[in-house]
Amino acid sequence: MAFNAAWHESTGFTPALLFLGREMNHPLGLRWELTDDDLQRSPQDTHLYWELALGNLKKARDRVAKRYNESRREAEFKVGDIVLVKLHPQSSRAHHRSAKLDNKWSEPFVIAKFLAKVTVQLANPDTGILVRKAHVSQLKSYWVGELAMKCKLARIATYICVNMIVNSPPGDDIASAVNFLFVFQSSYSLLSHPFGSRVCETSSGPRQRRTSVVGKSVLRLCLQR
């Protein structure tokens, strides 16, 4: 009775008024001994209430949709994008798995093609083999982190130095190639990356710079020549 006699914000009326065409009898109304003429409503009034309630429902729907869509945006994925797929892990005592500690996102996939406006075909980014289908609502863009970018830059620097050494005559431009490597690493802040020069704290001094892993490989190639 309390629910059916309560005013609802979405419709603007009580459920009893929309369903019965009148408000429900309540102890206060009975105590005041209201007559039936005061409680009766005509059928025309009932249809009017329905029309007003329908208009109020549309306004409430638009208001909720606007609030919901404020923090949403359309999927901006395209073919070739690297994405992650949302996982739904389940706890398993037999497999010693806890959903709370499991990965929430999959390994990176590449969008091979769009099967529909909101459905994509995913492929392995390394082999190109089609793996699975997914809905765009379950995808998240995968941005290459700073560490991976530094690793890529370090490999590029190594390839350039190796080409300079291999394509130059014996004894020529080796020093310039090695110098280019360290200048390149310093310019792209690769000194703290495993593929660049390592910077570490020591007990004897504040910081000492060790020979880079990439630099060692280039120097080893120089000595072989």
Image (cartoon, helix red, strand yellow):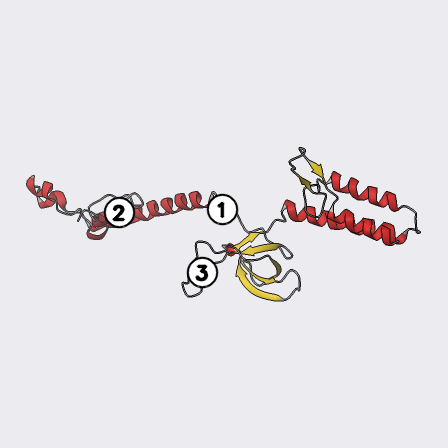
- Image coordinates of residue 144 in percent, x first then y, are 63, 49
Secondary element under disc 3, as helix, strand or loop, is loop
Amino acid type, callout 1: Arg
Residue 93 in view in this figure: yes
Compute the Cα span from label 1 to label 2.
Answer: 35 Å
- Image coordinates of residue 153 in percent, x first then y, are 73, 47
**Splitting the image into 4 quarters, where does residue 32 fall?**
top left
Amino acid type, callout 3: Arg
Q: Could you tell whether 31 is left or right of 106 in the image?
A: left
Q: Which of marks 1 and 2 is nearer the N terminus?
A: 2
Q: Of 77 and 39, which appears nearest the observer?
A: 77
Question: Mark 3 or mark 2, which is nearer to you?
Answer: 3
Compute the Cα span from label 3 to label 2.
Answer: 56 Å
| Residue at 79%, 40% in the rendered image | 183
Secondary element under disc 2, as helix, strand or loop, is helix
Q: Earlier in the sequence, mark 3 or mark 2?
A: 2
Residue to which mark 1 is pinned: 72
Secondary element under disc 1, as helix, strand or loop, is loop
| Residue at 58%, 55% in the rendered image | 83
Q: Residue furthest top?
A: 206
Amino acid type, callout 2: Tyr
Residue 33 in view in this figure: no
Residue to which mark 3 is pinned: 97
Res. 155 mark: none
**Splitting the image into 4 quarters, where does residue 205 fall?**
top right
- Image coordinates of residue 42 in percent, x first then y, are 19, 48
| Residue at 43%, 43% in the rendered image | 67
